[in-house]
Image (cartoon, grey):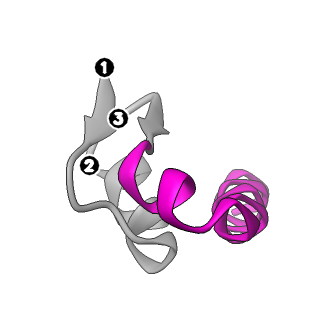
Amino acid sequence: MLALGGVRPGDVADCLAAGASGIAVMGPAMRDPAVVADYRAALAAASRT
């Protein structure tokens, strides 16, 4: 199951803790491709905990 819709980098850890196996991001990445690095960093940080 993926978390989708309104997920911000600060929400990633909570989504994973709630049972999502990952996240899907489209809108923010299309508006500002540089934000992808923020999501990747949030996923990496959540995976370390």
Q: Up-down: is 49 above or below 17? A: below
Quarter of the image holding residue 23? Answer: top left
10 vs 49, left or right, is left
Compare residues 38 and 49 and report the one nearer the observer. Answer: 38
Q: Earlier in the sequence, mark 3 or mark 1?
A: 1
Instruction: Say few, some or many: other residues with alpha carbon within 10 Å of mark 2 (under 14 / 14 to 19 / 20 or more).
Output: few
Mark 3, secondary structure of its residue: loop
Instruction: Say few, some or many: other residues with alpha carbon within 10 Å of mark 1 (under 14 / 14 to 19 / 20 or more).
Output: few
Q: Up-down: is 2 above or below 40? A: above
Q: Earlier in the sequence, mark 2 or mark 1?
A: 1
Instruction: Say few, some or many: other residues with alpha carbon within 10 Å of mark 3 (under 14 / 14 to 19 / 20 or more).
Output: some
Task: Locate residue 7, reporting x and y percent.
Answer: 32, 61
Quadrant that contains the N terminus: top left
For marks 3 and 1, give the CA distance: 5 Å
Q: Which residue is mark 2?
A: 18
For marks 3 and 2, give the CA distance: 6 Å
Query: Which residue type carries mark 3?
Result: Ala
Q: Nearer the viewer, mark 2 or mark 1?
A: 1
Q: Are marks 3 and 2 in contact (CB under 8 Å)?
A: yes
Q: Residue furthest front?
A: 31
Chain part drawn in magenta: 26-49
Quadrant that contains the C terminus: bottom right
Q: Which residue is mark 3?
A: 20
Task: Locate residue 40, reporting x and y percent.
Answer: 74, 55
Mark 2, secondary structure of its residue: loop
For marks 2 and 1, give the CA distance: 11 Å
Q: Which residue is mark 1?
A: 1
The residue located at (78%, 56%) in the rendering is: 44
Q: Residue furthest bottom?
A: 10
